[in-house]
Image: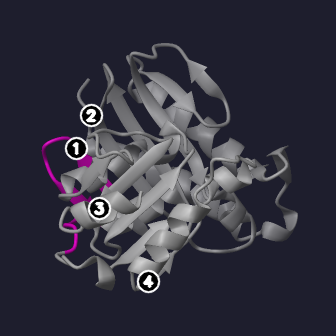
Amino acid sequence: MPISQPLLERIIRNAGEIALTHFRDLKHLNVDKKSPRDFVTAADLAVEDFLKAQLREHYPQYGFWGEEGGQSENQINRWIVDPIDGTHSFSRGQYYWSISVALEIAGEIVEGIVYAPALNDYYCATKGQGAWRNGQSIHVSELDDLNDAMIGTGFACLRSYLENNNLARFCRIAQATTGQRRLGSAAVDICLVADGQLDAFWEQELNLYDVAAGALIAKEAGATVTDFHGNSGIFPKQLLITNGKIFNQLLPLM
């Protein structure tokens, strides 16, 4: 069965309603820790369970990889799901969190959806067909001077207490640019590059389910998607996404 975009959007927006039900009643939200700085809530589990059931019902030919439940069934062709990217932000009542769903076929991401329910922004892309936000075509910014750029990042490496962290890179980049943003959801940050609201995003020590959908959306919007050495592809441990025009200026700072 081919992918039906209206069906997929309905499933993911319904998952968003489940998340919003919890978001509107945070005082009763159950929050646990997977590690000292990594949170999971009842909302994460409910959204992932819903998406797994719905995607399995409508597209049984694909396996499933969810952040909370792990991998199951066919992992050659699979849905890759982060039920709430930005759980810490979610649990504190902030708006920058999202549901990220990607479809991978034989190692290639062919569908990507990032839905930020609290912002009511639904980003999507199909390989080779452009990128969209709420039904409107989007494209990366035209800014071509790194000095004027606004750059997004995150600190997953610090959350994991890694010695190889991004602090030195952050200081170099912050001094070379006009604006820096850390919003708390890599999936949303990447979509903001696709939408021209940020000029680049970089982060290290992420996971594929954090970035798979957003990276396709950004690429379809005209972004470069590389590692810190400029190699093209989705590299969650070293991810650099730019509008293309500042890529050669930013890359040496990585």
Give, as a three-letter code, the residue at label 1.
Answer: Thr
Badge 1 or badge 2: first in the primary sequence: 2
- Per the model, the C-alpha gap separating discs 1 and 4 is 31 Å
User: Which structural element holds mark 1?
Assistant: strand
| Residue 2 visible in rendering | yes
Q: Name the quarter where the C terminus is drawn.
A: bottom left
User: Which structural element holds mark 4?
Assistant: strand
- Residue bearing mark 4: 179
The magenta-colored residue range is: 122-141
- Residue bearing mark 1: 126
Residue in the image at 57% along x and 44% along y:
205
Badge 1 or badge 4: first in the primary sequence: 1
- Per the model, the C-alpha gap separating discs 1 and 3 is 19 Å
Apparent side of residue 93 relative to residue 32 in the rendered image (left or right): left
Find residue 113 and report its horizontal and vertical position in percent.
Answer: 37, 50
- Per the model, the C-alpha gap separating discs 1 and 2 is 10 Å
- Per the model, the C-alpha gap separating discs 3 and 4 is 14 Å
Give the label on residue 41, or none: none
Give, as a three-letter code, the residue at label 3.
Answer: Thr
Find residue 8 and report its horizontal and vertical position in percent.
Answer: 36, 43
> Quick check: marks 2 and 4 in contact, CB under 8 Å?
no
Q: Depth check: give the residue in front, 251 or 25.
A: 251
Badge 2 or badge 4: first in the primary sequence: 2
- Residue bearing mark 3: 242
